[in-house]
Amino acid sequence: MIKQVLSVACGSALLFAAACNSHHDEADVNKKTGDILKANLDTTVNPVNDFFDYANGGWIKTHPIPDEQKSWGIAYLVQEDLYNRLKTINEQAVAKADNATAKKIAAFWKSGMDSACINKQGMTAIQPELQLIDQIKSKEDVLAVAAKLNVMGIGVMFGNYVGQDDMNSEKMAMMLVQGGLGLPNRDYYFNMDDRTKKIRDAYPGHIERMFNLAALAPITETKTKSQGIVRLETRLAKASRKLEDLRDPYKNYNKVAVSALGKLTPDIDWQKWLPMMGVNKLDTVIVGQPEFFKELNAALLSESIDVWKDYLKWNVINDLAPYLSAEVEQANFSFYGQMLSGAKKQKPRWKRVLDEEEKAMGEALGQLFVKEYFNEKAKKRYSDMVEDIREALKDRIKKLDWMSEGTKEKALVKLAKMKKKVGYPDKWKDFSAMEIKDQAYVRNVIAAREWWHRYEINKLGKPVDREEWDMTPQTYNAYYNPSNNEIVLPAGIFTVPGKRDEELDDALVYGYAAASTIGHEITHGFDDQGRQYDENGNLKNWWTKEDETKFNTRAAVMIKQFNAYIPVDSQHINGSATLGENIADLGGVLLGWDAFIKKEQYKKGEKIAGLDPGQRFFLGYSLGWLYSFRKESLAQQLLTDVHSPAKYRVNGPFSDVDAFYKVFSVKPGDGMYIADSLRVRIW
């Protein structure tokens, strides 16, 4: 589990790269126009009124969302390239499994692709877990089975994971957090807007249908059972914190001695439960939301054994449905894929198997991926770009007029110590003990999860491995880890579909890569959450009270700005929940611009495809947020995601950037205009 404070850029940058993508419409457009930025424009839109629609509208109008997707855009185009590359790696492993890693890749791929065998096996592959639940006779048995399911990666009752101690980044700690819900988060159980209410009303019927398909109970009893499950989950949801409240690292940090956990949950014997999870000789845990665990204890006492057994069975079938028969898998998709996210049909099986293989042993695939697709020259280019951005933030910090000199000095120390990881890890994980073999697909999935559980638990009591990566090299994403004070930039994030690196000018690159990814991630070290961690990754206040107040006052301007945006129906962006990402987006644009204007292309001012360097920079950034969404998916994002929708990750920060006003001559009365005194001024 990645820490909530971690950033997910989900957005842009580029790679030397991209072979094997002639199948893309994007590539066809590029061949005709010669310029990806020009090709995507909707010139019927005035950029000063809606820059996102101007920059990306031409592409969006001509590229409807495929039926199997809930949204469509740049990441999916890149992913298409990645899918095809990874498919080739798997097929080569099947044809010639000449080492242990290739054999595991081949076994996983074959078990996932054998749909006839999966359908024939039906529910028999998970009978051991269902029979174990049937044997439950006491609350102690409920807890014991819950421990076993958690080892299998089925998060029943609550969440738990191993991570760095926020107050001591040199130590790994066991985290206990709220969880155990079948709907995406607590708001789905209580919000009264029509869309969310429709989902909530359909949820009991979905559980009932899944019970019937899996023959988990007599048909005459499944309706009552589904109602009991929803009632139990609603209790847990009511005691759960809202999305924005989970972003306060201090309020979600409560270190408790294992011996004292009984005061919080007197009916859960943690000294027996933790060893069932493989956790031994543990002195303390960090409890994220104590009030949730109090309610869990109360529910354990007051809800019947039968309700708990039904709840556990529901979690098993709900979690493992994608790896079972086509009928069960489709029913699961109908609710979670179609109703919640708006997708019209499932991805092809081979892509679904690759998605799961990525979770299981993506780094094993990554070793083969980088040999073929990410060379040392590419790694150096983006390593150097990180230093350009670091220097830009250094200059900005020195020039701040609202921050005291003492806090500035500490900020500069933190920036200087921020570690960069680019492309791929220097040390690869060893998957030799992972039990992937010729067996049912779902058993291979479970075997991978159990390996990961042991891998994570094994970190307790050992020195922190600061060289480890939490993403695979082929991932189209990036993150900032506050506990390590590091930015991690996988090779996959540096990809533009249909283009090779040498074809891309600096203006596009510094918008697309330096601003929306590198600058974004570096700024996370200084957003409303990241700023609370020191240069060594410890949760420690290094700000003066006055500086902290000034920061919060400036951040409040951004909260107000984003609260006013209404992306779908009557649903507003949650400015508090998305604050960290919005600050990082704005910081990324500012830093990318500061770095770009030092480049020769900007100084020369020559146009490409009729666009000057400044225009190409802002269009390059916008390319990183080239997405369209189904309404269902957008509504879900607004309730569950700390990132603003793509359109507002362009229009929002641009409205606060003075250089944007100059480049595009934005004036009062224009849609993108915000009065100078009301613009966000932080970093």
Image (cartoon, grey):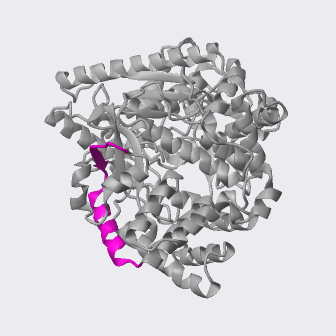
Residue at 39%, 39% in the rendered image: 163
Q: Looking at the image, is 51 positioned above or below residue 481?
A: below
Return the x and y of residue 554 as percentages of the image width and height: 27, 40
In the rendered structure, the answer to whether residue 427 lies left or right of residue 269 reads right
In the rendered structure, the answer to whether residue 401 lies left or right of residue 608 reads left
Is residue 554 in sight in this rendering? yes
Quadrant in which residue 623 is drawn = top right
Residue at 47%, 32% in the rendered image: 660
Return the x and y of residue 379 as percentages of the image width and height: 59, 17
Q: Is residue 290 a member of the stretch shown in magenta?
A: yes
Q: Is residue 303 a member of the stretch shown in magenta?
A: yes
Quick one: which residue is furthest to the left in this view? 545
In the rendered structure, the answer to whether residue 148 lies left or right of residue 20 reads left
In the rendered structure, the answer to whether residue 350 lies left or right of residue 484 reads right
Return the x and y of residue 280 as percentages of the image width and height: 36, 44
Q: Looking at the image, is 571 positioned above or below residue 220?
A: above
Quadrant in which residue 134 is drawn = bottom right
**Looking at this view, is 10 or 114 the one in front?**
114
Residue at 43%, 67% in the rendered image: 142
Is residue 590 in sight in this rendering? no
**Looking at this view, is 74 or 305 the one in front?**
305
Return the x and y of residue 664 as percentages of the image width and height: 52, 33
Q: Looking at the image, is 153 positioned above or below residue 521?
A: below
Q: Tell me where the magenta segment starts and ends, as one range.
A: 280-304
Q: Looking at the image, is 287 positioned above or below residue 420?
A: below
